[in-house]
Image (cartoon, helix red, strand yellow):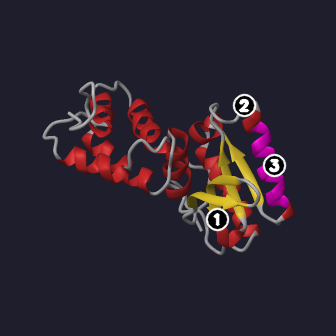
Amino acid sequence: RHPSKSPPRTRIEDTVLDLVDVSKTAREVEGWLTAACEKRLTTPERLAASLMSRKKISWRPMLEASLLDVAEGAQSPLELAFLRRVERAHGLPRGERQLRWAGGRVIWIDVDYLLYRTRVELDGRLGHQGEGRFRDRRRDNRGVVGRIWSLRYGFAETFGSPCDVAAEVAIVLSDRGWTGTPRRCGPGCPLRDG
């Protein structure tokens, strides 16, 4: 229980872990973790500390790995998928996540490859409708004026064809000075190594 709240209630971290414990799917687990941290109700560090005090919990190995990725800045299941299935799986350079850019208005950048002046925006449904679409356009247009290229992906591309997304990102990064090469993520990956 929270020591000072009335009526009595559990701490946010315990509530999140309780919800994770009864989750039916991995995506549901990721959703609870990322939502709590993205809304700044808690932190990955506080969730990890609470997790350490539990002897039994469903999804523990995945939960521990996910907390590390959320601490790195992935704030949604879509952003976790991009980090794991696109960037890491294909050996792309590590992007900076959730960079705060202030230029008249505060703008958050999902993934920024600062050295290569390239951004990746990951568009789920939430926050990218109505006024969110106009905010995204303004951000993209400001980036182009500043010679920063933006790539934009959603659930269909990131979950459905991560190898194609990795290939596109690698081409843009190479055009912008990246000297590395993407790698195949497995036997069925259409990318060529080296």
Say if residue 103 shows up in the picture: yes
| Residue carrying label 2 | 129
- In front: label 2 or label 1: 2
Q: Tell me, for residue 113, which label it has, or none.
A: 1
Question: Which residue is found at the position 52% from the left and 48% from the top?
Answer: 85
| Amino acid of disc 2 | Gln
Q: Label 2, label 1: how many angstroms apart (C-alpha)?
A: 25 Å
Residue with the mark numbered 3 = 138
Q: Position of residue 185 (x, y in %)?
A: 51, 53
User: Does label 3 or label 2 sit earlier along the sequence?
Assistant: 2
Which amino acid type is shown beneath numbered disc 3?
Arg
Residue 142 drawn in magenta: yes
Looking at the rendered image, the disc whose residue lies closer to the viewer, 1 or 3, is 3
Circle 2/circle 1 CB separation < 8 Å: no
Dot 1 falls on a residue whose secondary structure is strand
**Pointers 3 and 2 in contact (C-beta within 8 Å):** no
Left or right placement of residue 124 versus residue 41 in this view: right
Please tell me whether residue 59 belongs to the stretch shown in magenta: no
Distance from Cα at disc 3 to Cα at disc 2? 14 Å
Amino acid marked by disc 1: Tyr
Instruction: State the residue at coordinates (64%, 61%).
Output: 112
Q: Which residues are magenta?
A: 133-144
Magenta stretch, main secondary structure class: helix
